[in-house]
Amino acid sequence: MKFISKKLAALALTGLLAMGILGCGGSPAKDKGAAGGKPSGEITLYTSQPNADAQKLIAGFNKKYPDIKVKVFRSGTEEVVSKVLAEKKAGQVQADVLLVADNVTFETLKSKDLLEAYESPEMKNIPAQFVDKDHMYAGTKVITTGIGVNTDRTKEKITSFKDLLKPALKDEVTMPSPLYSGAAAYNLGVLTRTQGIGWEFYKGLKANGVKVDKGNGSIQKAIVSGDKAAGIIVDYMVIRTKKKGAPVAFVYPAEGSPYVTEPVGLLKTSKNKAAAKAFIDFILSKEGQELAANIGYTPVRDDVKAPEGLRTVKDIKPIAADPMALFQNRDKDKKEFSALFAL
């Protein structure tokens, strides 16, 4: 998969260098995979992926590994991470595999020595900009954020983020909270550091009566039901409901699209690393990526086609920011957002 521009490649390289700087010191030993016979037993997946999607992923995995039971804890990325950190403090981390929104979240866990290096044999098929330099995690899909519109509720022309500030959309816009959604937290960091958008955009949203809800699922419901005319939301949720006949459209904003790659990683405290590694291998494999595309995600591998209705990576106009700055300022950004919206 070829990414879009030299500029983005430079940003990706910066991210990889940042990941090395933020690592736990030294170059971790590379575990080459699950040795021995076919793995079995039980693992626990902590994820922010919608429940239905997680179950489809597990069902596909179990066709290949019927002797591995996968238990799931699902919530917004911020709550998942809070749970992991609380469990670490108690000395009882339950998760074996983590599958959540973005690389900044994984850098937080990496800095706290919670992840274990695992160089999955499938990583060689993933573009380098989506793989952690120390093999602590790798992206599994490309999810952009844009604008969902209920075409029955409004006929207003919406082509950009700034269009959400129009008087015609007063009290008609909703967005996910970065205090709950990892993708929203990532987007907050990116958009506030993007020239022409910045904190002024969020201040404008507040002045225009935006409703801050929980995660992207809540935004999807509000738009599909017609409770709100438009919302800031991830791409696949709008495309799915449109295919089911909902009067909705997804807009790739003229300013560009922030994106996350929903990385997967192995927890250092896993009690069944062979099975956990098999699960990671499956997600990154061509078979696993085809399953992701069939569910409705843009795959991260360049040998698997994107589903109908979604742009391929080469067709997306990306918005990115320095991963080091995002990592170092995430808590500060969320506090500023909380203060602005009195949350």
Image (spheres, rainbow, N blue to C red):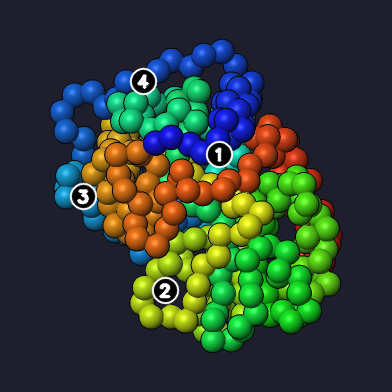
Give the residue number, with chain letter if any, for mark 2.
Answer: 241
Give the residue number, with chain letter if any, for mark 1.
Answer: 103
Residue drawn at x 40%, y 68% is 240
The amino acid on which the numbered mark 2 sits, given as a three-letter code, is: Thr
Q: Earlier in the sequence, mark 1 or mark 3?
A: 3
For disc 1, the neighbor class at 10 Å (few under 14, some 14 to 19, many from 20) is many
| Element carrying mark 4 | loop
Quadrant the N terminus occupies: top left
> Residue 248: percent from the left, percent from the top?
49, 77
Residue 62: which disc?
Answer: 3
For disc 4, the neighbor class at 10 Å (few under 14, some 14 to 19, many from 20) is some
For disc 3, the neighbor class at 10 Å (few under 14, some 14 to 19, many from 20) is some
Q: Earlier in the sequence, mark 2 or mark 3?
A: 3
Above or below 298: residue 125:
above
| Element carrying mark 1 | helix
The amino acid on which the numbered mark 3 sits, given as a three-letter code, is: Asn
Label 2 or label 3, whichever lies nearer to me, is: 2
Residue drawn at x 35%, y 39% is 301
Question: Distance between the Cα atoms at labels 1 and 4?
Answer: 21 Å
Give the residue number, with chain letter if any, for mark 4.
Answer: 31
> Would residue 277 be seen by someone viewing this image from the given angle?
yes
> Would residue 89 be seen by someone viewing this image from the given angle?
no
The amino acid on which the numbered mark 1 sits, given as a three-letter code, is: Asn
| Element carrying mark 3 | helix
Q: Quadrant of residue 230?
A: bottom right
Q: Is residue 321 left or right of residue 115?
A: right
The amino acid on which the numbered mark 4 sits, given as a three-letter code, is: Asp
Question: Distance between the Cα atoms at labels 1 and 3?
Answer: 27 Å
> Residue 86: percent from the left, percent from the top?
60, 46
